[in-house]
Amino acid sequence: MARDILITGGAGFIGSNLALEIQRREPGAEIVIVDDFRSGSFPNLEGFRGDLVTAEVGLLDWHRLFGDRPPEMVFHLASITDTTVTDTATQMLANVEGWRRLLAFLAGKSLHLVYASSAAVYGVTSSPQNRVGDPERPANAYGFSKLQMEHLARRFSGENPKIPVAGLRYFNVYGPRESHKKKSASMIGQLACQIRSGKTPRLFVDGSQRRDFVYIADVVDATLAAALAPKGNGVFNVGSGHSRSFNEVISCLNVALGTQAKPDYFPCPYRFFQPHTEADLSATKDAFGYLPRFSLEKGVYAYRESGWLGRDCEQ
Ligand SMILES: NC(=O)c1ccc[n+]([C@@H]2O[C@H](COP(=O)([O-])OP(=O)(O)OC[C@H]3O[C@@H](n4cnc5c(N)ncnc54)[C@H](O)[C@@H]3O)[C@@H](O)[C@H]2O)c1
């Protein structure tokens, strides 16, 4: 693995898990995290020994930070992650213009680049599975901004053919170090909080909507594999490859927490709520051999064993 590694958004859920895993696998790596803490959280970085730069991606003087020793591996995860921020300018300025500035700094350098896109680019599709190449119809400003990031990356790739650039369309990620996201945390984390605090878990009618829930350890593996793969160029789905209903999530949580909670159903207020997501992983497997290891049952169990399930819940 490269020794000089940049992770933007490293104080967030996925970024902190990634940083700590790289540090574990490669103790000699020099990791620089850039995060402005708009949604990140310092307890996520307990045990992190690298450099933590508090700055906004779109405003940082990248040349000054790295001088003539640019990173060899870049993971760009910083983004507004609250999908209910509906103001398009806010999403675009933070997510796309910051990315544009980072790409301008990285142009012509020698490195591997991985960035976070999202299953939100698919929007409300009727397809049971989401394949890269399916029509992208983002239904909110967040998904739209992620799609614009992909377009920018594609252009950058054309102009910088020696730099492998992998965009990862993460599906519904859950696991340790997500509690700071509150109402943007995974439904698994939120429902666990409701159950653990003795409340009735709340679902949109009728709980049969399905999601591809993917455990954070699989996401970290996929993200690292994308950075290391010679064929890791393009856009790839990162999910579990299976869809499970919200009602099934409640059943799994009841097993993990030893409870017998029954959901309270209420009408969904969101026009853009996806009825079904499920990652087609064939291209991801071909490009970097990604094979998810965690079923929903196994992931929820691992989450509970980590001690983070239902921890730091807002009361
Ligand atoms: N968690 C998921 O289920 C999921 C699904 C699809 C895509 N993603 C994408 O994965 C990435 C990581 O998401 P996450 O779940 O870890 O969210 P998160 O909110 O926990 O992490 C995002 C981090 O980026 C930082 N940040 C945001 N904008 C910034 C900016 N302009 N400059 C510097 N720092 C900034 C935040 O402070 C935060 O620490 C995001 O790009 C997100 O869109 C996540």
Image: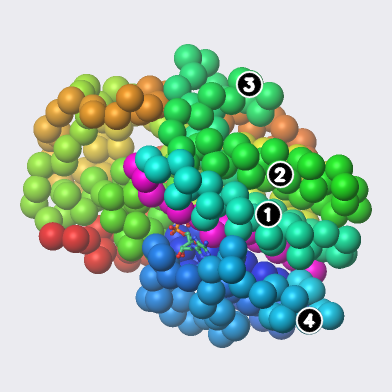
CA–CA distance in space, label 1 to label 2 = 7 Å
Q: CA distance from mark 1 to mark 4?
A: 19 Å
Q: Which residue is mark 1?
A: 100
Q: Is residue 229 magenta?
A: no
Residue under circle 2? 152
Q: Are marks 3 and 4 in contact (CB under 8 Å)?
A: no
Q: Mark 3 vs mark 1: which is more N-terminal?
A: 1
* Residue found 45% across the figure and 28% down from its top: 139
State the CA–CA distance, disc 3 to disc 4: 41 Å
Q: Secondary structure at mark 2?
A: helix
Instruction: Give the mark nearer the N terminus: 1 vs 4.
Output: 4
Instruction: Say above or below: 315 vs 22.
Output: above
Q: Residue at x 64, y 55 (%)?
A: 99
Magenta-drawn segment: 72-85
Q: How far, Cα to Cα, is label 2 from label 3?
A: 19 Å
Amino acid type, mark 1: Arg
